Image (cartoon, rainbow, N blue to C red):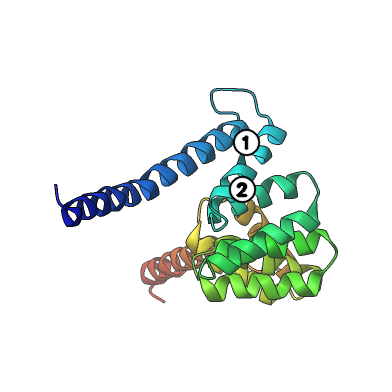
Amino acid sequence: MCLLTIVSFLLMLASEGSAQKPKVWKAEVDRIFEEAQRFHLGIERPTNLKQAIDLYKQVLKLDPNHTNTYYNLAGIRFAQNRYDLAVKNYKQVIKLAPEDGHSYNNLGTVYERQGKAKLARRLYQRAIQTDSSVAMGYYNLARLYSKEDKTEKAMSLLEKALSIEPDNSTFVNQHARLEGELGKISNTTVGLVVGALAGVIILYSLLAKVKGV
């Protein structure tokens, strides 16, 4: 076998090996991430957040841009009241996936827990600007406006949230509360009142005909 043939053969093997590495690497990342989720969510084993965090960190060593890992870590840190770390992780998600409206909303929730209402409001607004289907963004803004006694503004935002998630009991209950504050009559009530008035008018017309009025 000539030298040129040997070199070509070695290059071919190296090329095949390089092509296999990303597949093997991705499979390992996916395996560790799935294992972390099992401990995180208590799937097929007891929940163990410490173990989950350790595994998520392993994922990030292999793939520093693994968006879902930062997202899950942020959720854990929020539940642990480690708001500083939750902020750090949500910011990383936003950096990697700026189109993810839910992350802006979640980061706003963390800021609100930290007592940073103005910053939270900006994040909630950014959430619905980025993705108009983020119902919680409208709901959270509605809550803030409600606290400021801006009930009509809150109602408008809450109705947008309900248009996205009409069966969300939290939204429905909040809507009923705000409706009471505004002293509004619901559409259903209006329908019943109009129907009753129509019935009275028809009855009066019939009586008038009978009496020859």
CA gap between label 2 and label 1 equals 9 Å
Quadrant in the picture for the C terminus: bottom left
Where is residue 137 drawn, in percent x and y? 61, 65
**Picture quadrant where residue 126 is located:** bottom right
Where is residue 185 drawn, in percent x and y? 62, 66
Q: Residue 45 or 148: which is nearer the viewer? A: 45
Where is residue 59 drawn, in percent x and y? 57, 45
Residue under numbered circle 2: 72
Residue under numbered circle 1: 40
Q: Is residue 211 left or right of residue 189?
A: left
Q: Residue at x 54, y 48 (%)?
A: 62
Name above or below for residue 154 compared with residue 64.
below
Instruction: Pick out the residue farthest to the top.
Output: 45
Is the residue marked by circle 1 packed among few (<14), some (14-19), or many (20+) residues within 10 Å?
A: many
Where is residue 56 drawn, in percent x and y? 61, 43
Label 1 sits on a secondary structure element that is: helix
Q: Residue at x 62, y 38 (%)?
A: 55
**Picture quadrant where residue 88 is located:** bottom right
**Picture quadrant where residue 177 is located:** bottom right
Question: Closer to the N terminus: mark 2 or mark 1?
Answer: 1
Q: Residue at x 67, y 52 (%)?
A: 74
Disc 2 to disc 1: CB gap under 8 Å: yes
Numbered circle sitting on residue 185: none
Please name the amino acid that badge 2 sits on. Answer: Asn
Q: Residue at x 47, y 36 (%)?
A: 31
Q: Is residue 81 left or right of residue 21?
A: right
Name above or below for residue 39 compared with residue 2.
above
The number of numbered discs placed on residues in the rendered structure image is 2
Please name the amino acid that badge 1 sits on. Answer: His
